[in-house]
Image: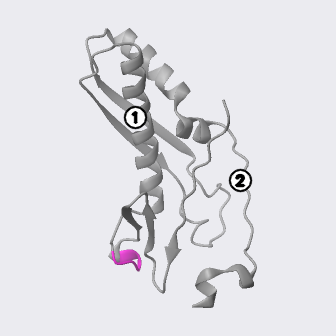
Amino acid sequence: MADKRVMISTEMGGDFTVRADIRGHQVAIDQPAGGGGKDEGPTPLEYYLFALGGCVATIGRVAAMQKKINLRGMKITVEGDYNPAGLLGKPSEDRIGFKTIQISAEIDADMTEAEKQAFLDMVCARCPLHDNTHYETHVTHHLLDSADCESCKA
């Protein structure tokens, strides 16, 4: 099957708020008021964990439909531990990102605990965000030439 590309464009003005229009959904990332933001949305780290939990739940629904499992619901809790020193520009021996991420799932379906665990293992193995978090993903970054920059022309 051919690769499918997902693209998101974000925009930030003179404060911490980052906005995007994603398929007609207006979303915002911000910092808490105590951290200099206006608290207009979750932080990037909170969105990351939300996206991971949402992906696990969504793949759970897809897998349940494929396997004809009556999945009444799932509750996914995602917790991540990180040292904020690096992102604040302070010296740190730790890496900047999450050092550990824990996913906990409650599965409401007529399955034994062993079957639920096997189902969760299979779901996590199929989840793209779990894969991106679990394995190394090559990430690149580059600066657009100012002549090509739409917001620079304004």
Which one is nearer the viewer's eye here, 7 or 98? 7
Q: Which percent across, then down, holds residue 152?
A: 63, 87
Tag 1 near tag 2, CB within 8 Å: no
What kind of residue is marked 2? Answer: Val
- The vertical placement of 71 against 100, above or below, is above
- The vertical placement of 108 against 93, above or below, is above
Which one is nearer the viewer's eye here, 61 or 110? 61
* Boundaries of the magenta span: 34-38
Sequence order check, earlier mark of 1 and 2: 1
Q: Which percent across, then down, holds residue 111?
A: 30, 10
Q: Residue at x 54, y 40 (%)?
A: 129
Q: Does residue 37 show up magenta in the picture?
A: yes
Label 1: how many residues lie within 10 Å, few (<14), some (14-19) or many (20+)? some
Q: Residue at x 46, y 37 (%)?
A: 102
**Majority secondary structure of magenta residues:** loop
Q: Residue at x 42, y 44 (%)?
A: 79
Q: Which mark is residue 126?
A: none
Q: Which percent across, then down, holds residue 136?
A: 70, 41
Q: Where does label 1 land, which residue?
A: 58
Quadrant position of the C terminus in the picture: bottom right
Task: Answer with the quarter of the image where residue 16 lies.
Answer: bottom left
Total numbered labels: 2
Quadrant position of the N terminus in the picture: top right
Q: Where does label 2 land, which residue?
A: 139
For label 1, the SS is: helix
